[in-house]
Image: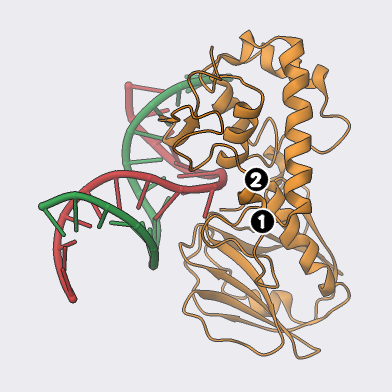
Chain colours: A orange, B green, C red
Amino acid sequence: MPELPEVQCVVNTLEVLKNKIIKEVIILNNRLREPVQENLNTLLKNKIIKSVERKGKYILFELDSGLIVSHLGMTGKFLLQNNLIENKFNRIVIKLTDGTYLIYNDIRKFGFLTYEKELKDNKYINKLGIEPLTKLFNKDFLFKKLSKNKTAIKKFLLDQSIIAGLGNIYVIEVLYNCKISPLKIANTIDIIDSERLVIEIKRILKESIDKGGSSISDYRDANDKEGSFQDSHNIYGKKIDTLGHTIEIIKQNGRSTYYCPICQNI
DNA sequence: ATTGCTTCCTGAGCGC
DNA sequence: TGCGCTCAGGAAGCAA
């Protein structure tokens, strides 16, 4: 479900957790992508949440000692509640000492939440590529990476070890807006298109964050609020584009790619 | 080193 | 109503 903008919006709404203290952790279902640590309550009890931040699509809760690493998978969400609302998809309930709750809810259980002593050597975070909203992500950086890669640009942009945070929707939208075929081989993209890609990636991510992310089916922020960027999508989930062109849907590496064969010529 | 296929899990939407 | 099928914002693990 969530790509960089959605994860960022969740993190933004989790800002209120700063300096709150964990009182108790209740595991309702431990069968997440990473099995929930049996002693999670012992590990987290009395820990102070110092800050919440995003790396790629991961969420990091920095504690006074150690940290929580979490990924939302396709349907994971964090919910902040003053009174616990029962839900069959609540997987982990974290009670805070001020009486409020932080809940990890996940229908499909593709996400996870683990406690780690340190971030160093983390197998997930270590593999992440560049943050697309930083200055280091520029046309020269991208062009250099593209020129060394022989895969389709669609797959290239989805690779979290190259650029951290893009997912299926934003890659599809970026390629359409840049009029680049998703089938184009990465190393055939020139410096001009590299720059257009960088500009469009930054623009779309920022605009989506501003609009609270894309709520396609069940994405909500930690206050259970929907985003509105789905209204700005030009091609994902559509049958025709604004020019009246029929949109094609193909499979690339098991994921659906929406594209316009007329606008996005190889 | 890369590629593509399968797997994890649950629900929604469709045709029949 | 119900069955069976396909699809879904992700990504690890595996064989080739």
- What numbered label is drawn on residue A147? none
* x, y percent for residue A85: 58, 86
Residue closer to the observer: A91 or A237: A237
Mark 1 belongs to which subunit? A
Three-letter amino acid code at the position of disc 1: Ser
Q: Which residue is mark 2?
A: A232
Q: Does A20 sit left or right of A39 as displayed?
A: right
Residue A228: numbered disc? 1
Secondary structure beneath dot 1 equals loop
| Amino acid type, label 2 | Ser
Q: Vertical placement of A156 versus B16: above or below?
A: above
Of all chains, the one bearing label 2 is A
User: Picture coordinates of residue A99 (x, y %)?
Assistant: 76, 91
Q: Quadrant of the C terminus of chain A?
A: top right
Q: Position of residue A50 (x, y in %)?
A: 87, 68
Q: CA distance from mark 1 to mark 2?
A: 8 Å
Marks 2 and 1: in contact by CB < 8 Å?
yes
| Residue A95 in the figure: left or right of residue A258 | right
Whether residue A130 appears in this view of the structure is no
Q: Residue at x 78, y 48 (%)?
A: A120
Looking at the image, can residue A76 be seen?
Answer: yes
Q: Quadrant of residue A101?
A: bottom right
Q: Position of residue A108 (x, y in %)?
A: 45, 62
- Helix, strand or loop under label 2: helix
